[in-house]
Image (spheres, helix red, strand yellow):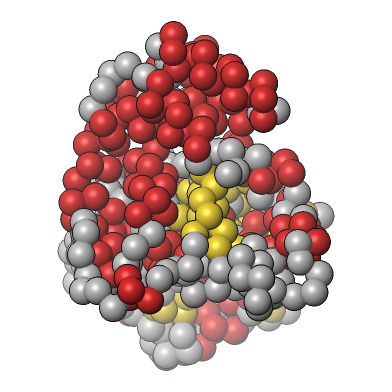
Amino acid sequence: MISRAYTVAFQGVEARPVEVQCAVAPGLPAFSIVGLPDKAVSEARERVRAAFAALSIALPARRITVNLSPADLPKEGSHFDLPIALALLAAIEIIPPEAASESIALGELSLDGCLMPVAGALPAAMAAASEGRRLLCPEASGAEAAWVRDATVIGAATLGDVLRHFTGQGVISPARPGEVVEDTGCKDLRDVKGQDRAKRALEIAAAGRHHLLFVGAPGSGKSMLAARLPGILPMLSAAEALETSMIQSLCGLIDSGGICRSRPFRAPHHTASMAAIVGGGRRAQPGEISLAHNGVLFLDELPEFSRPVLETLRQPLETGSVNVARANAHVSYPSRFMLIAAANPCKCGALSDPGRACARAPQCAQDYMGRISGPLMDRFDLRVDVPAVAFSDLDQPACGEGSGEVAQRVAIAREIQTSRYDGYAGLRQNADAEGKLLEEVAAPDSEGRALLLQAAERFGLTARGYHRVLRVARTIADLAGEPLMRRPHVAEALSFRIPA
């Protein structure tokens, strides 16, 4: 008899169904796993054997063959332990065969039969719900998987609990979703003294999800400003939180099943590799741009990143997704993020101070900023020069608007955009608008159009730059609560686009 259990294999954020077939046949005693397993899956037979021994279950002295179908799909990870154990238990008639086949199972077995948490419980639960099956997983992963509304999740602590559940000796209650995690560590914008223009640019970027570049002397507050961006961004919607959590689930970053409604803020070091930023590696894991999906990717010391890494950002910035192609994997991850970058004006950082600038100034500035290619620079909607803060400003007490007041204006502007793009698939903020829709929603008045055309011709704006000015001007008008884009909105957008 051939028994069957079901699990999933992960390809990107997609959980593809896998049928685990187990046959116990006459022959020399052996336990083999076939179907393109990796090392972790091949080692499952030893963990299953030890877990069975801990439950005083003896494997029959026969030939045991486990097939993972489809056989041409790579199987990776330790979560195949539990479905292999279920198929084997059904094959030796310890649990009913239909019990093993009614669930999608995933979980790692320890040698004493305990079920260890695994990555990917959330996308596995979505796959189970789409197929009309329940999900059987470790108890520690149950709270995470239970966030999928239509899924029935059974979280078991040990393999013995699974046996008692399927034999009716001790039924396990369905898992409950974890807590909503609130990020209370956001820093206040009021801590930044001076830099009113940079604060204004940060507000515009947050309202329309625009990409922003800070250029200024060391110690002028560029990183400090970027660190306060999460405090003025609105919370993730339910759909956005689920999208973001699926990626975090694949990387095992969800703690105790709690889902965070705060937008992710990723700040990789400038020595990060291409695979770390874009995604890849042996298992084609998501990179920083995908972990920043629906949030912020902050690249401090932008020119210090390697040129190939920076150039790979160009396509995800335009499409909102990244395709990771490797010899053994072709996967796609969402990567709709807001790019915030900071850079010194030159290698020494003292370009604006003739007394401290190096002997190669201003050529050193051209060489240093020349590490950032023109096409990538063209994708920044706002570019802000951040001057050094005067000592007289540092001596003053904190004043000005805090993150709470700015966050209220940002939230109102985003609500306007949500209403505007309701019904358009994949469009949420002004940064997403393009083509004919952009011409409709971001049409300036006659004076604004004349100014924009004059500036585009004089300063040689590219077509991309022209459209990005329109998007920023639309966001500025939304912050002002005005339905029509006027000349002042266009002028302010141009001031952040054209260097002084």
Q: Is residue 455 above or below residue 341?
A: above
Residue at the image point whose x is 32% and y is 16% from the top: 484
The percent coordinates of residue 70 (x first, y second) are: 66, 49
Q: Position of residue 390 (x, y in %)?
A: 40, 71
Determine which quarter of the picture holds residue 412. top left
Q: Nearer the viewer, residue 189 or 309?
A: 189
Q: Is residue 82 above or below residue 385?
A: below
Q: Is residue 212 visible?
A: yes
Task: Examine the rendered structure and indicate whether residue 53 appears above or below residue 356.
Answer: below
State left or right for residue 96 relative to residue 45.
left
Q: What is the quadrant of the N terminus in the image?
A: bottom right
Nearer to the camera, 2 or 277: 277
| Left or right of residue 477, residue 301 in this image | right
The answer to whether 469 appears left or right of 127 in the picture is right
Residue 163 placement (x, y as % from top left): 33, 72
Q: Residue at x 28, y 34 (%)?
A: 479
The residue at the point 37 percent across, 19 percent down is: 486
The answer to whether residue 20 is visible is: no
Residue placed at 21% from the left, 59% from the top?
A: 400
Nearer the observer, 312 or 399: 399
Q: How many marks?
A: 0
Viewport quadrant of the C terminus:
top right
